Image (tube, rainbow, N blue to C red):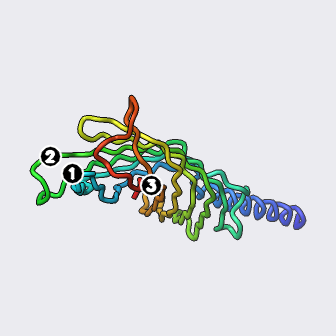
Amino acid sequence: MKKTLLVILAVLCGLSAMAQDEKAIKTRRPKYVNLGYVLQQDVTLETGEVLKPEFGATLNRGRTYYLHKRPIGKFLSFGIDATWIDLNYAMYKPHKFMTYDETSLHQAEIAMQVGPSITLTPAKRLQLHLYGRFAPTFALRYVDKKVGGNYASMFVAGGNLSFGFFGVGVEYRKGPKMGYKEFGGGKLKGVIDNIIGG
């Protein structure tokens, strides 16, 4: 009888430990959707007019592919992030004191991202996610009724702290200087080459 109770107790303890490990796995959220506000750099036109970003938004969706089944020490995970869709939009307006002409500029970027990440899960629903990614990006600009675009290789670094499904984060993007080519040929006039991203 005692042996039977000991075996049952051992099995229950084993099941409890497995359930705790499964909970640790479930607290890692592999899929992510991020909505954000964008702070872009000022854009200088060839006329010397400076356009300031008035509004910007971003949306991206992806997944973290963890490199190991269970978190190391039940809280540390390494993975590869794959952001399948990354959309970025910014609208620029001139400084009011610089011109009477209402020149406006719209910039949109579409990209994918891939890179390493570290996820820390110190508590049940609390998660810190740090990452660095390579982001091949196609950027579009609309200015003076003309549309131009070009490709750029961007690098993204950032992190977010989340509790459950809600969190806050910060992200920095760095890219090369580039000229926007007008669709139909030629360089998009009026815009000095600048670094895309913010």
Q: Which residue is mark 3?
A: 177
Question: Residue at the top extreme?
Answer: 184
Q: Secondary structure at mark 2?
A: loop
Horizontal and vertical percent position of residue 99: 12, 53
Horizontal and vertical percent position of residue 189: 31, 42
Tag of residue 137 = none
Q: Residue at x 31, y 51 (%)?
A: 56
- Where on the picture, by quarter, is residue 12? bottom right
Q: In the rendered view of the protein, which quadrant contains the C terminus?
A: bottom left
Q: Residue at x 50, y 63 (%)?
A: 158
Q: CA distance from mark 1 to mark 2?
A: 8 Å
Q: Which residue is mark 1?
A: 93
Q: Which residue is mark 2?
A: 102
Q: Which three-letter amino acid code belongs to the residue tagged 1?
A: Lys
Q: Residue at x 31, y 48 (%)?
A: 191
| Horizontal side, residue 113 vs residue 88: left or right | right
The answer to whether marks 1 and 2 mark residues whose Cβ atoms lie closer than 8 Å is yes
Count residues near mark 2 (Cα–Cα under 10 Å), then give few for <14, some for 14-19, many for 20+: few
| Horizontal side, residue 188 vs residue 74: left or right | left
Q: Which three-letter amino acid code belongs to the residue tagged 3?
A: Lys
